Amino acid sequence: MLILGGTGWLGRAVAEAAVAAGHDLTCLARGAEVARGASSVRADRDRDDALAGVAGSRWDAVVDVATQPGHVRRAVRDLEAAAERYLYISSCNAYASLADPGIDESAELNAPLEADELASLDDYGAAKVACEQAVLAGFGAARTVVVRPALIGGPGDPTGRSSYWPLRFAQPSNPEGRVLVPGAVADDAGPAVVSEQPTSLIDVRDLAAWILHLIDSAGSGIFNAAGEPIPMREHVRLARRVAGHDGRMVPAAPAGLLAHGVAQWSGPRSLPLWIEEAEARGINQLSNARARAAGLRLRPLAETLADTLAWGVQQRIDIANGAGLRDDEERELLALAETGAL
């Protein structure tokens, strides 16, 4: 097996699982350390001849996590005659709309990016479509697997989206142990409960194991890779349980959160996973029926959250590790909520 990459979060998870399963694995990367037990080929995929060191070998499978269309186009050009099948890890952002629940693999896609490089992150979905199309054009449908993940979470999450809630409940920002959570749409009496908006998360370890299953079974096709949708209320309840939190949750009305600069979904000063915008709610409700029929197995969310909490504590990960509210930001907002200003 050849992994083009294998040193990032998902790529490394696939590489470690492949080595553990006894695959003869090679990782082609710029130079970062690869999984123990894998061979390493150093290459810069910005170069036209980047794959010269692996194109002369025979590969049962290639796994590619690239985003730049030029990288994938050159890989397909150089590896089509050398590899039996090509598994490309795309994204649910390939879909033209993420507004509707139950989006399946037949939904309309973005127009593919014609350029070889992204000009901005606004081109991300279009770039993923261009990469998918390059693989399908070169390898054909019978030799291609395309995986479109939704939100990936679990130990090692570099985005901070899946670690924020268990870490926040384990380490409140205030002596009283209060934790700010997104509330339901407010009425005259204010929000009384945690938001019912859907969330969904697939554990990186489950995704990696399933990718290997697809390779081992010589499968082909296009698949969403997503966890089961559950309400935000249930997600934070599980995070609170695994953290052993017994303080008070303070729900804040969506309008108040947005008015005070709290971001949705991800990033600084956010409440991760929370989405109010109707045009984006489908990202947490993708259909995973085809993936489940092809062998995807999902562990309980509580297990993912508990393991993510243990990793975060062991590694001393900042609670707002790329996403979430810093302690001072949460205390500021809690004070506003207590006075009815939020």
Image (cartoon, rainbow, N blue to C red):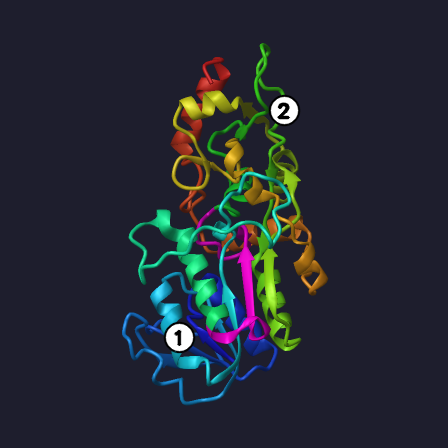
The residue depicted at 42 percent of the width and 70 percent of the height is 5
Magenta stretch, residue numbers: 138-160
The percent position of residue 320, horizontal first and vertical second, equals 42, 42
Furthest-right residue in this view:
293
The percent position of residue 335, horizontal first and vertical second, equals 45, 20
Dividing the picture into quadrants, the one containing residue 47 is: bottom left
Residue 147, magenta (yes or no): yes
The percent position of residue 258, horizontal first and vertical second, equals 44, 25
Answer above or below: position of 249 versus 310: above
Residue 336, magenta (yes or no): no
Side of 206 where 65 appears, left or right: left
* Mark 2 / mark 1, whichever is N-terminal: 1
The residue depicted at 54 percent of the width and 57 percent of the height is 148
Binning the other alpha carbons within 10 Å of mark 1 as few (below 14), some (14 to 19) or many (20 upward) gives many
Tag in front: 2 or 1: 1
Disc 2 to disc 1, how far (Cα)?
Answer: 50 Å
Tell me the kind of residue under disc 1.
Ala
- Front one among 36 and 198: 198
Residue 208 is tagged as none
**Mark 2 secondary-structure assignment:** loop
The residue depicted at 55 percent of the width and 62 percent of the height is 147
- Front one among 114 and 243: 114
**Mark 1 secondary-structure assignment:** helix
Q: Can residue 36 be seen in this view?
A: yes
Residue 75 is tagged as 1
Tell me the kind of residue under disc 2.
Val
Q: Can residue 334 be seen in this view?
A: no
The percent position of residue 44, horizontal first and vertical second, equals 30, 73
Q: Mark 2 points at which residue?
A: 193
Answer above or below: position of 7 versus 311: below
The residue depicted at 41 percent of the width and 22 percent of the height is 259
